[in-house]
Amino acid sequence: MLKTTTKLLVSAALIAGIATSANAEKTFKWKLATTWGSTLTPFIDAPTNMAKLTEEMSNGRLQIRIDAANKHKAALGILDMVKGGQYDMGHSASYYWKGKDIDTLPFTTMPFGMTAPEQYAWFYYGGGMELMKKAYAKHKVLSFPGGNTGNQMGGWFRKEINSVEDLKGLKMRIPGFAGEVMAKLGLTVTNIAPGELYTSLERGTIDALEWVGPGMDIKMGFHKIAPYYYTGWHEPATELQFLVNEKSYNKLPKDLQQILLTAMRVSAYDMYIQNYDMSATAWSTMEKEFPNIKVKTFPKEVMDAMKKANDELLVEKSAGNPLLKEVLDSQKAYQKKARKWTEMSDYLYLKDNL
């Protein structure tokens, strides 16, 4: 009996070795769908660079084809396509799925939330990755940070905002949880596709919109129509996401899994610093060439009303959603801890050196 068992174990080991060896030589060809069009830099650059890194580091064993939104025609259908196996991967933003699954909302960013460095620290060292894995497990999908915009601007407005009353009745493009905050203050909120934003603002279909920041806004031309450019509050650390079909991921050999993880992490951070450079460069141009742009901060009355509406909505959304509450509580606790260091290291330095 012992000899038979030993022979079976040896045979199993040999078969496993052959299978592993064969798998090591196998070429995997994946498809990735993005929410973004093929020219929307730097958003489209993150998955493009990730695919290039993956192929180079794997010596061609893992090849990923990028399908931009203008090809697959389902910009906001990425989660469903990756979940269903139509695509092995996706690149989008987690807050787009709040209507399908409220638990996914906080993994992009939250109004009055963490800055990008704080949020990255929370993801990788404060339990954020584990909570995101837990939230997406029900979809049989893995989610990973996919590039950060940093603090986004509060939007382009046709008229100056001096009070909460000035907001009431305005039509504004603003997605995510911030859109619900603004709706609570009396705005009509909509989420229009990027390619239609300029025309909508020009024709008066909307009175205001938020996009990202100078680096991405300059090409859109919003400043030619709406001169009031408000500073941010709603998306202090907008993290895009890589979505990975769990079955596809599990079929990869361990070394290719690690290569994929590394490529995603590198390309995500690269997008963050690329976007920072784009905004710094773009604003230096806009400031000189378009002196009519008026940079504004929302008045204290408006900010206080936004914070009040935000807090009320958080309580409302968390009720009956234990995982959402767990994520929000985790973020709040980490922000409280990290903010003291952010103030000491960044705020006080800037305050004394501007």
Image (cartoon, rainbow, N blue to C red):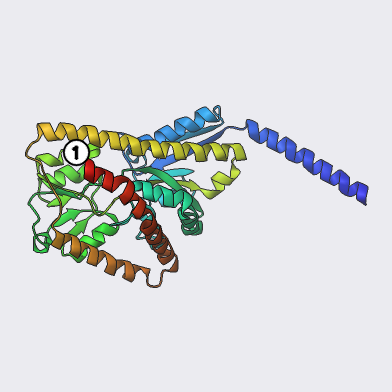
* Residue at figure coordinates x 78%, y 38% from the top left: 14
Image location of residue 334, percent across then percent down: 40, 57
Image location of residue 135, percent across then percent down: 46, 58
Q: Up-down: is 26 above or below 77?
A: above
Q: Quadrant of residue 234?
A: bottom left
Q: Is residue 21 left or right of residue 27?
A: right
* Residue at figure coordinates x 6%, y 39% from the top left: 292
Residue occupying the far bottom of the picture:
320
Tell me the element at label 1.
loop
**Which residue is the site of mark 1?**
220
Q: Up-down: is 55 above or below 71?
A: above
Q: Is residue 60 left or right of residue 334?
A: right
Q: Residues within 10 Å of mark 1 (few under 14, many from 20)?
A: some
Q: Up-down: is 318 above or below 30?
A: below
Q: Is residue 347 left or right of residue 140?
A: left
Q: Quadrant of residue 352?
A: top left
Of 56 and 161, nearer the camera is: 161
Could you tell me which quadrant the C terminus lies in? top left
The answer to whether any part of residue 67 appears in the image is: no
Image location of residue 293, percent across then percent down: 10, 41
Of 148 and 217, nearer the camera is: 148
**Hey, what amino acid is under mark 1?**
Met
Residue occupying the far front of the picture:
352
The answer to whether any part of residue 301 appears in the image is: yes
Q: Is residue 256 left or right of residue 314?
A: right
Q: What is the tally of numbered marks visible in this picture?
A: 1
Of 143 and 154, nearer the camera is: 154
Image location of residue 214, percent across then percent down: 21, 39
* Residue at figure coordinates x 38%, y 50% from the top left: 119
